[in-house]
Image: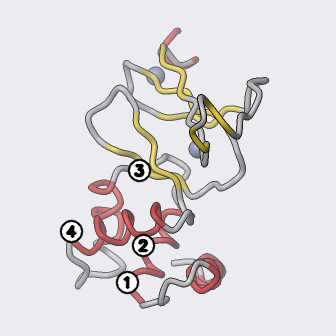
Amino acid sequence: MNKAAQLEASELLKNADVYPSYQRIMVLASLFESDEHPSADALFKQLGSNVPTISRATVYNTLNLLVDKGVIRSLHTAGAETHFDSVSETHGHFFCRKCKKIYDIPQQNTEVKHELDGHLVESQELVFTGLCKECRE
Ligand SMILES: [Zn+2]
Ligand SMILES: [Zn+2]
């Protein structure tokens, strides 16, 4: 596993007031290395070869903690599983209903609202669904 990713992960955890334990660092670092928006399960499998001692529960709990702390984002797609994203800049997603891949797309021209009907907006999730360019062919 890439040392720079681990270092970055450790810094992000500290900045978010999360104790940077080895397992947390490894979970976050492996999310950095994946551009596939993995589910918790996929990430657990990916981690298995690097951190054989990590448990599925640790991966789930760490991901949920990191979402709570705003370090990563969770994505809800038409699929059953929740996917996770380490990219913090605002961007949208395109979910392919056929191959189930999630693509990053540039933020569309939707106005970012800070208040809706008196509710305070903290984040907004933009997910388009359809057929990706590979599945269209
Ligand atoms: Zn597709
Ligand atoms: Zn993304």
Residue carrying label 2 = 27
Q: Residue at x 59, y 78 (%)?
A: 16
Real-space Cα separation, disc 1 to disc 2, in angstroms: 6 Å
Crowd tier of the residue under label 4, counting other residues whose Cα lies within 10 Å: few below 14, some 14–19, many 20 or above: some
Q: Earlier in the sequence, mark 1 or mark 4?
A: 1
Instruction: Identify residue type, mark 4.
Output: Arg
Q: Residue at x 42, y 90 (%)?
A: 22
Real-space Cα separation, disc 2 to disc 3, in angstroms: 11 Å
Proximity of marks 2 and 3: CB atoms separated by less than 8 Å: no
Q: Residue at x 66, y 55 (%)?
A: 88
Residue carrying label 3 = 38
**In the image, is the residue at mark 1 within 8 Å of ligand 2 by its beta carbon?**
no
Q: Residue at x 72, y 51 (%)?
A: 89
Residue carrying label 1 = 23
Residue lying at the far front in this picture: please name it: 118
Real-space Cα separation, disc 1 to disc 4, in angstroms: 11 Å
Which of 129 and 115 lies nearest the eye of the viewer? 115
Determine whether the residue tagged by mark 2 lies in a helix, strand or loop: helix
Real-space Cα separation, disc 1 to disc 3, in angstroms: 17 Å
- Please say if 70 is above or below 127: below
Q: Position of residue 10 (x, y in %)?
A: 58, 85
Which of 4 and 108 lies nearest the eye of the viewer? 108
Left or right placement of residue 116 versus residue 50 in this view: right
